[in-house]
Amino acid sequence: LTPGAGRSRTGNMDNSSAPSRRESWAALAYFAAYLGYLLATLESEIAHWLTLVAIPVLIALAFGGWRRSPAVVLDTFGLRRRGWTRGLGWALLLGAAITVLQVTLFGHRHEILAIIQSGRALWLYPVMLLLMFGMAGFTEEFFFRGFLQTRLEVLTRSPWAAVVIVAVLFSLYHLPYAYLNPMWPSAGDWGLAWRAAFSNGLPGGLVLGALYTLSGRNLVPCIVLHSMINAAPAMTMIRFGGG
């Protein structure tokens, strides 16, 4: 595929590659069912590869045509062989800025700073970055930006309306984790869980959604940025000896 294959000069998908409205409604219905499933039981990061990646691809194939090549299908999600660096510079700059805020202002700042001062961050941060790239960074961006945002853009006929709606859905997705996961300070408290889910998911969803749109619906910068956002806090989940 060429950098602009399947897209107009403005970055919008043309009629030959845009998801159908039927596929777009199916994507929204799947999110509703998936959210109900999460409220009943939290799933592992490995399971995300089934629920957030494999099933959306099957939905795209079922409603968009089984005869399409893998390259064409993946292009509807924002994954293509050429032009993948578009928007990557912004992703790296935003990721670096957010990491600085995590070290200086946000909740885990003291733990993150202690890991940096100990020197463990020299190897721990790259390891966490790679892990996040292969877990939530990829799976969540594939689902929310690559799958839902592109399909909601078809329904709303507005890329920016899709950005806002998916940011809200991204927040709702975090709600079961905020309430059910004992590692979250909000566990067991619905009021705190709602605040935690939206205070994390809404701004992050808006930034990632805007990056996806402004980079010409290129998923790679979003995966990189998401991974950078998660990497520094993830370092605090590793325990060394009795620490």
Image (cartoon, rainbow, N blue to C red):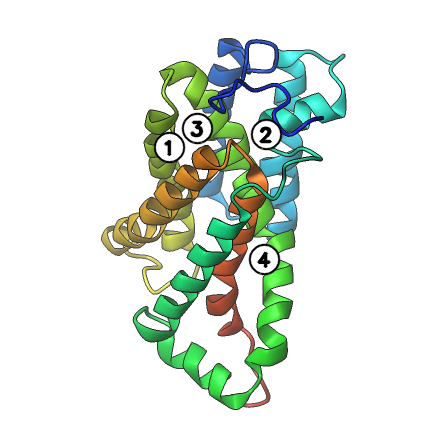
Most distant residue in the front direction: 9
The residue carrying mark 4 is: 132
Amino acid found under the numbered disc labelled 4: Met
Tell me the element at label 1. helix
Are the two marked residues, 2 and 3, in contact with CB atoms closer than 8 angstroms?
no
- Distance between the alpha carbons at the discs numbered 2 and 1: 15 Å
Are the two marked residues, 2 and 1, in contact with CB atoms closer than 8 angstroms?
no
Tell which circle, 4 or 3, labels the residue nearer the N-terminal end: 3
Up-down relation of residue 80 to residue 119 (above or below) = above
Tell which circle, 2 or 3, labels the residue nearer the N-terminal end: 3
| Closer-to-camera residue (208/238) | 208
> How far from the left and from the top, in percent, is residue 19?
55, 15
Amino acid found under the numbered disc labelled 1: Val
Are the two marked residues, 4 and 2, in contact with CB atoms closer than 8 angstroms?
no
> How far from the left and from the top, in percent, is residue 108?
38, 72
Tell me the element at label 3. helix
Task: Give left or right: position of 241 versus 148.
Answer: right
Q: Nearer the viewer, mark 2 or mark 3?
A: 2
Amino acid found under the numbered disc labelled 2: Phe
Up-down relation of residue 58 to residue 176 (above or below) = above
Q: Nearer the viewer, mark 4 or mark 3?
A: 4
Up-down relation of residue 153 to residue 41 (above or below) = above
Task: Give left or right: position of 67 versus 130.
Answer: right
The residue carrying mark 1 is: 163
Tell which circle, 4 or 2, labels the residue nearer the N-terminal end: 2
The residue carrying mark 3 is: 32
The disc placed on residue 77 is 2
